[in-house]
Amino acid sequence: MMKILMVCLGNICRSPLAEGILRDKFKKRKIAAEVDSSGTSNFHFGERPDPRTIEVADKHNIDIRSHRGNHFTVGDFDKYDKIYAMDLSNFRNVLKLARSENDRSKVEMILNVSNPGMNMEVPDPYYSGNDGFELVYRMLDQACEIIANSVETK
Ligand code: 4NP
């Protein structure tokens, strides 16, 4: 079974949303895959997602209320086949922990799925208003649609 990890900084905004979106797409396609998320910081370990993340997910019929903040650790390279970073800072912080070329090969900027080679970042919506969360939702939905379709055809 394919195992995918979404990574951001706090694990309360972008990556729990990415996890919820991709999980929903796999469920609808009846694909058995594991999707989780974590943060490169432990700032919000054990916490619920930001209320604005819960709200934007709700709006798109995705329930992420059961998520609790995780902290990315080196063992995650063994647990997951693919690790998607939301921005360049997350990407670099994850790569710093990589022990091998195999570890490094698992890590990708999530928007390179939808915009190959451009290293575009999912903007951190923490200090933005609700429109920031909707923009993040749309970027992640587009990338996750491609991920779900690519797993399906394998
Ligand atoms: P996230 O957003 O990385 O998308 O979960 C953030 C959440 C919290 C903080 C920064 C970004 N913070 O500094 O507490």
Image: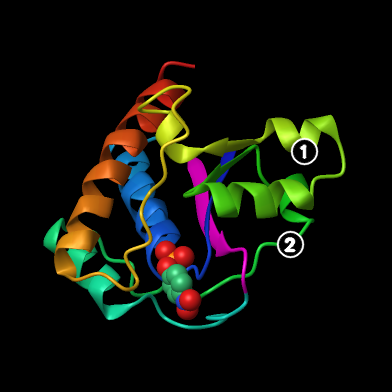
Residue 90 is covered by the magenta coloring: no
Residue 154 visible in image? yes
Residue 102 position (above or below residue 77): above
Residue 151 position (above or below residue 2): above
Where on the image, by quarter, is ligand 1?
Answer: bottom left
The quarter of the rendered structure image containing the N terminus is: top right
Circle 1: residue type = Asp
Which residue is tagged 1? 103
Is label 2 in a helix, a strand or a loop?
loop
Question: Which residue: 15% across, 56% down?
Answer: 60
Q: Nearer the viewer, residue 145 or 153?
A: 145
Q: Does residue 130 appear left or right of residue 48 in this picture?
A: left
Which residue is tagged 2? 73
Q: Are marks 2 and 1 in contact (CB under 8 Å)?
A: no
Residue 67 visible in image? no
- Which span is picked out in magenta? 32-41
Q: Does residue 152 appear left or right of residue 56 in this picture?
A: right
Question: Which residue: 24% across, 74% down?
Answer: 52
Callout 2 crowding tier (Cα within 10 Å): few <14, some 14–19, many ≥20: few
